[in-house]
Image (cartoon, rainbow, N blue to C red):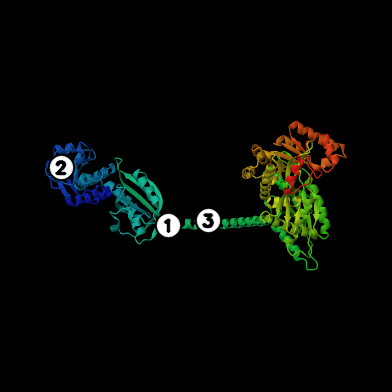
Amino acid sequence: MHMAGKAHLGLKNHEVLGHFLDAASHLTGATGAILIVRDQEQWRTVATYGTAPEVRADEITGGWLKMVLSYGDVVDVGEAMPADAALPAGLDRVVNESLVCVAIRDGNAALTGAVLMTIPLPHKRLSAAHIYGVQTHAADLYDSLKLTPTQAAGGSAVIERLRLLESVVVNAKDAILITEAEPIDLPGPRIVYCNPAFLTTTGFSLEEVMGKTPRILQCAETDRATLQQIRDALQRWDPVEVELINTRRDGTKFWVQLSIVPVANEKGWFTHWVSVQRDITERKDAEQNFRQAQLDREERVALESRLIERERIQDELSYAAFHDELTRLKNRGYFMARIHSALSKGNADQPGAATVVYLDLDRFKYVNDGMGHHAGDILLKSVAERLSECIDPSAVIARIGGDEFAILLTDEGHQEQAIETAKRVTHALSLPTAIDGQQLFISCSIGIATLDVQHTTAEDLIRDADVAMYAAKKKGRGSWAVFDLSMRQASIDLLVMQNALKHAITRDEFYLVYQPIFSITTETIVGVEALVRWRHPTLGIVAPDVFISVAEDIGVICNLGQWVMRNACREVKKWAAATGSGGIKLNVNVSGVELNRKDFALQVAEIIAETGFDARALQIEITESVFLHEPEMVAKTLEDLRAQGIRIALDDFGTGYSSLGYIDRYPIDAIKIDRSFVTRMMKHERSVAIVKSILSLGEALDLAIVAEGVETLGQLDQLRELDCPYAQGFLLSPPVLPEDVLALLVASRR
């Protein structure tokens, strides 16, 4: 400001005041000004400008000016003075404008003059920077109007120094701007100086720059966050250095490194901002090229990484496509592909060499149900490891699914090799497996099938091996069987039976027979056991031991069991009414699959309610195998049945592994001694002893005892001597049709 003020030397007072007003207006918004100065103890009005009224100096410089300046060197008269304070003549004509009085002091702080400015209402309150800016302009104004020769001579050295500095600035390669200190907010501090480098860099002329703000350099690409950083620094009067994009007059963009510092006078007041702008476009372009090169390198590295990752994923997908995730053995897809390969090497007369050894773990479901799927997974992995250890590496071992595994042999003499393989596998899997601190013993059933001319697909060979495996299961746990054509026919027959069973109830093909249970002492019928029979239109009479297991496998056993219980309850209730006796008990066999249903007890309750049968006359017969089906669920179901008054009988007692344990753990009301003990009783004293023990156990635990399979008078007499209470068998009565039961009941009560 000071250098700009000296530029006004020699101008007329009115013009000088006009320049002052331009500067003051940019800072404060003033539209008019009055300048009064003191010259040798005399005050005079030097000039008025703009909208300010004409006023005499002696009207102002009396006590009024002293009173006003007692509030400070820059005073908003309307805010500082009392509302009823009188204004000097002439100033009272100021309307809709604020009157601001600014003191002008010399280096010794003596009052040398004053400026009265008129600012249209409303306007912002003047900040300290505004006040000092106005004071600086006013001091420069006074210096411009009154400069003594002595003062001029004393300032020549300063002027020389300023010329030297100006020479440096003028010849600098960096663009240099000097702006006023305020306002920082819009419209921003005005440019009061720029060097030639600035004009060269930006393409603006001096006339286009002076009096404007640095905002003329901003464009849409100028970073707003960087501008805010500058603004925050300026508000704190802090230096700031940033890099940002500016625009030239022709609209082209260029990068600058911008340094802005505040400039203070000898009193410590900030009067200007000096900014130095260095064109760094070439550096930025180089940096961008470097970054692009870095990105290109990173992209190449990333591409290589992606290719490596893709290859890894492809390897994993390829592995997953042909391997079982749990056991890490080959999977069914790979196994079938290898059989297809063997098929392709043969011809119509000579098939390719391939034998499948197909194995299924016996009773694996009970491991999952009893110990959980975690234990089942451990067992499957153990099986996979043992198979890998005992089978030739040239063979293909695969997990087909669930608990089924298969081995493919492709060497000559494969059937003999397959039998040896089956023996090794059977032995390897018979060894105990430790799971969760328990020793688990398992076995497997194995089917063997060799590729022949009748096999046209891999599925054909797998099917025959599977059929042989089921034939092995029928032989007993831990068995193996080689496929022959009779097995295929048996498989077809099984499929026919399965399909027929699904419709047998709706086609009314089932019927019931009843085998009486006698009191040995009174020789009277105390109950009947309902037994289901199947009369198929083409298969004829199908035995229960043939179709019951099939019904369990295909999921129709529950519907069949409900049909048996509903019809038996109706018929026994009818017989009881006809004979006038309510003492007839009904025994109904229930499978483990039925007991494993959560709603089984509720279904029984609904049948009893529907038929009106007395629940206390119903006794459900179960075998020890039911406890292998989720024993906790079975125990809950049995308790629910007993809560209805239904009794529970343990059938085939003595043939299982833990009969006594079951009696102790579950709610059992009756025991049926297996027919094998009754049969051997006449020849083996040990069997007699076992029967005696069972009878003693029943008496001690208050259990009803029924001896099954009584077929001779000798057996009946022996049981009578042992005080066995009840018996059942062909000697007493075979199973009979419903229409014959009533006659037996009447005859037994005579």
Q: How many residues crowd mark 2 within 10 Å: few (<14), some (14–19), many (20+)?
A: few
Kind of residue at disc 1: Thr
Q: Which residue is mark 3?
A: 294
Q: Secondary structure at mark 3?
A: helix
Viewer-nearest of discs 2 and 1: 1
- Above or below for 66 versus 53: above
Q: Is residue 531 left or right of residue 282?
A: right
Residue pictured at 73% horizontal, 32% vertical: 702
Most foreground residue, 12 or 484: 484
Find the residue positioned furthest to the top: 700
Q: Label 2 vs label 3: CA separation?
A: 73 Å
Q: Earlier in the sequence, mark 3 or mark 1?
A: 1
Viewer-nearest of discs 2 and 3: 3
Residue 582, image x and y in percent? 69, 39
Q: Secondary structure at mark 2?
A: strand
Q: How many residues crowd mark 1 within 10 Å: few (<14), some (14–19), many (20+)?
A: some
Q: Earlier in the sequence, mark 2 or mark 3?
A: 2
Residue 132, image x and y in percent? 26, 43
Residue 10, image x and y in percent? 20, 51
Quarter of the view holding residue 501: bottom right
Q: Which residue is mark 2?
A: 39
Q: Which residue is mark 1?
A: 281
Q: Secondary structure at mark 1?
A: helix
Quarter of the view holding residue 569: top right
Kind of residue at disc 3: Gln
Kind of residue at disc 2: Asp
